[in-house]
Image (cartoon, rainbow, N blue to C red):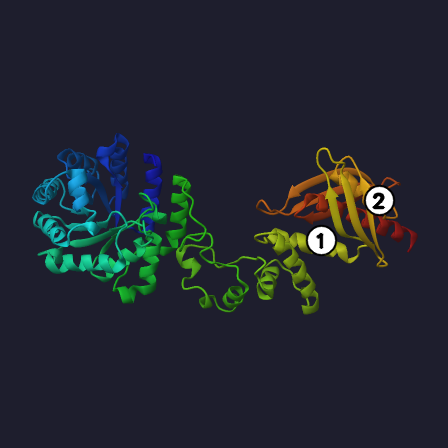
Amino acid sequence: MNTEEKLIVARQLIRLGVDVIEAGFPMSSPGDLRSVQEIAQLAGDECVVCAFARAVDKDIELAAEALKPAKRPRIHVGLGVSPSHLRDKLRMTEDECVDRAKHAVAYAKEFVEDVEFYAEDAARADIDFLIRVVQAAVDSGATVINVPDTTGFSLPEEYGARIKAIIENVRGIEDVTVSVHAHDDLGLATANVLAGIRNGATQVECTINGIGERAGNASLEEVVMAIATHGELLDAHTDIRTRELTRSSRLVSRITGMSVQANKAIVGANAFAHSAGIHQDGVLKSPETYQIIDPTAVGAHGSDIVLSARSGHAALQHRLAELGYSFEQSEFEDVYQRFLEIADQKKEVYDEDLESMLEERSRDVAAIYTLDALQIQCGDPLVPTAVATITDENGERKIVSATGTGPIDAAYKAIDKVVSVHGDLEEYVVKAITRGIDAIGEVVVRVKSDDGMLFIGRGADNDVVVSSAKAYVNAINRMIATQRSREGI
């Protein structure tokens, strides 16, 4: 994100009610330094604004410079503490690490009162050494201790035990905020921070949508709603304005270009969607049967009944009622069977599909000719050929075939072999009336009779050639009905 985008997100984080915004790493680039400065000015008294720094004097100095406009500044400084980090990255001994931690915290305290110390890769550190480093940071004036599972290594029980050990063995920790910070490499980030909370941590470092390095960080919306749902068990609460969660998620997704997976907890498109018939029936009777969160509590519009081949009668009746349609039970069964035919062809049946289905049904009620089946063979170098099965009003079924310049021309010529009148095609329009690659296509045709009258026909189907044939038959039916009406038949 550039500075302008960070400011947009920062405004939303303030609306969301976060306690701390870690605004950037000033040493990393002039752009990050500017971002921290502008967010610090924007936040005012609303929340703490934090700048990240390594345990390097220049980093700390630039963080302090960037935080000058902040009313509630915090410097977040630290270094790695695991054997891997000490040996392979920092190339220092444990004693040198402790000395560096002491100096970094003390130096940061010269600029701001609120200093957070991070013990990077704490989850893989020797526990005795981790306690020693944390003690050194607390003795040097750290106000927040961050215990990161930098690589997403921990199991919840292990991570919780690590937090508990720090709280029980570090002198003065009762006056310090203990913070948890987990990555999601094993899909356990939310579980780990909740374990940390149960063992005494009072700050959670998390991200909107769980974005972050590699597999990401603990998801803010998941942590917040877990606390909201199990606050008594966790002995925790948060002042986050949960109705802003969905809005925040969509904003961050839009700005970063990182899509939220459909089945993402709390903010995914399917988080409150129900497609199984059993679930739909239960939710329609009482949302609590299959939902532990009220969708409106997180800013979502409500439960979503997804119509598919797995949907039952109750779900279809509910959706049709919302669209303004009602049917007697005997009549509804025919509607449901037609719905299943469409659902077998599509992943999801949308409102537009239902409306098209019902319009088609109303057109078929007074049909003089009904298109029962259509088979097309075409391609290069094949001759386009159509085989149509058509039933007339007397119940007589005919199977006819014809060739044409294309599949639609062949279909229309085959239909003309059965119907008692002929119409000249004046206009042909096709459009997708529903969403998705498997969208239903609607065809509208205008057909001219021998006496110059125009008749409109409509047809809809997943196959645009079938839609075209249905539209032509519909126009022919209207033409015949009009002629009979004129003749008093």
Label of residue 78 in the image: none
Looking at this view, name the residue that lies furthest to the right: 487
Judge whether residue 147 can be spotted in this image.
Answer: no
Spatial separation of the CA atoms under disc 2 and disc 1: 21 Å
Question: 196 or 15, which lies in front?
Answer: 196
Label 2: few (<14), some or many (≥20) within 10 Å?
some
Quadrant of the rendered image containing residue 169: bottom left
The secondary structure type at the circle numbered 1 is helix
Point out residue 60 in the picture as x, y percentages from the top left corner: 16, 37
Question: 23 or 313, which lies in front?
Answer: 313
What residue is rendered at 27% in x and 40% in y?
A: 39
Judge whether residue 381 can be spotted in this image.
Answer: yes
Quarter that holds the C terminus: bottom right
Point out residue 241 in the picture as x, y percentages from the top left corner: 34, 55
Horizontal side of 448 relative to 125 (left or right) equals right
| 142 w.r.t. 91: above or below | below
Looking at this view, name the residue that lies furthest to the front: 381
What residue is rendered at 78% in x and 49% in y?
A: 474
Point out residue 322 in the picture as x, y percentages from the top left corner: 59, 60
What residue is rendered at 48% in x and 59% in y?
A: 303
The secondary structure type at the circle numbered 2 is helix
At label 1, the amino acid type is Glu
Which residue is tagged 2? 416
The first of marks 2 and 1 along the sequence is 1
Looking at this view, name the residue that lies furthest to the top: 30
Quarter that holds the N terminus: top left
At label 2, the amino acid type is Asp
Label 1: few (<14), some or many (≥20) within 10 Å?
some
Label of residue 360 in the image: 1
Question: 254 or 95, which lies in front?
Answer: 95
